[in-house]
Image (cartoon, grey):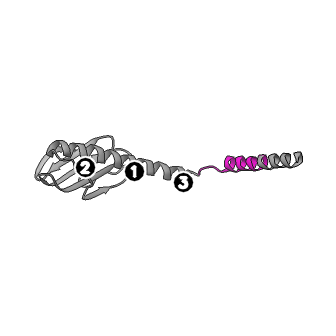
Amino acid sequence: MESQVVKGLIAVLAVMVVGFVIIGTTKETEQEKRSGAFLATSSLLSSLALDKCTAAVKQEIGTNPYSPSESDSDRTAFVKLVWNNVGTAKRAECRYVMDQGITLLQIDDHTVIKKEAVQTSGGSAPAGVHHQ
């Protein structure tokens, strides 16, 4: 009876040691690290843009916009969101640029915010923004 318990404990320890060895030798590749960083940045950018633009549109028209009707993004530097038929507005457009905030907020034909986005290194400028 004692020998079976000892054999069982040795088997469990052996499985644990093999597991630790496998985990210890499995390293994340550079490609996997870059892919993970890209996904995290893209997710953060989309989340920030949705939060900030939704709040700005709500402040202007008094109605909380839910899911955007249209969206566009380069997934690294900017997100453009468009809501159709939100409250009293037929169209609300918001452009959010990473590290610069909202660079365009337009409700119907009224431009509330319009700032020229400054191109940052490593990212492309949003479409429609010209630099000299």
Q: Is residue 29 rendered to the left or right of residue 76?
A: right
Graded by Cα atoms within 10 Å as few (under 14), some (14 to 19) or many (20 or more), the crowding at tag 3 reads few
Q: Is residue 31 magenta?
A: no
Total labels: the figure holds: 3
The residue stretch that appears in magenta: 13-28
- The residue carrying mark 3 is 31
- The residue carrying mark 1 is 42
Three-letter residue code for mark 3: Gln
Q: Position of residue 87 (x, y in %)?
A: 14, 52
Q: Nearer the viewer, residue 8 or 31?
A: 8
Mark found first going from the N terminus, 2 or 1: 1
Any part of residue 32 in sight: yes
Furthest residue toward front: 1
Q: Residue at x 20, y 52 (%)?
A: 93
Name the mark nearer the viewer: 2 or 3.
2
Q: Are marks 2 and 3 in contact (CB under 8 Å)?
A: no
Q: Nearer the viewer, residue 117 or 74?
A: 74
Q: Is residue 67 rendered to the left or right of residue 42?
A: left
Q: Position of residue 31 (x, y in %)?
A: 54, 54
Q: Are marks 1 and 3 in contact (CB under 8 Å)?
A: no
Q: Residue at x 21, y 43 (%)?
A: 56
Any part of residue 117 in sight: no
Marks 2 and 3, how far apart at CA: 30 Å
Q: Residue at x 21, y 55 (%)?
A: 83
Q: Disc 3 on helix, strand or loop?
A: helix
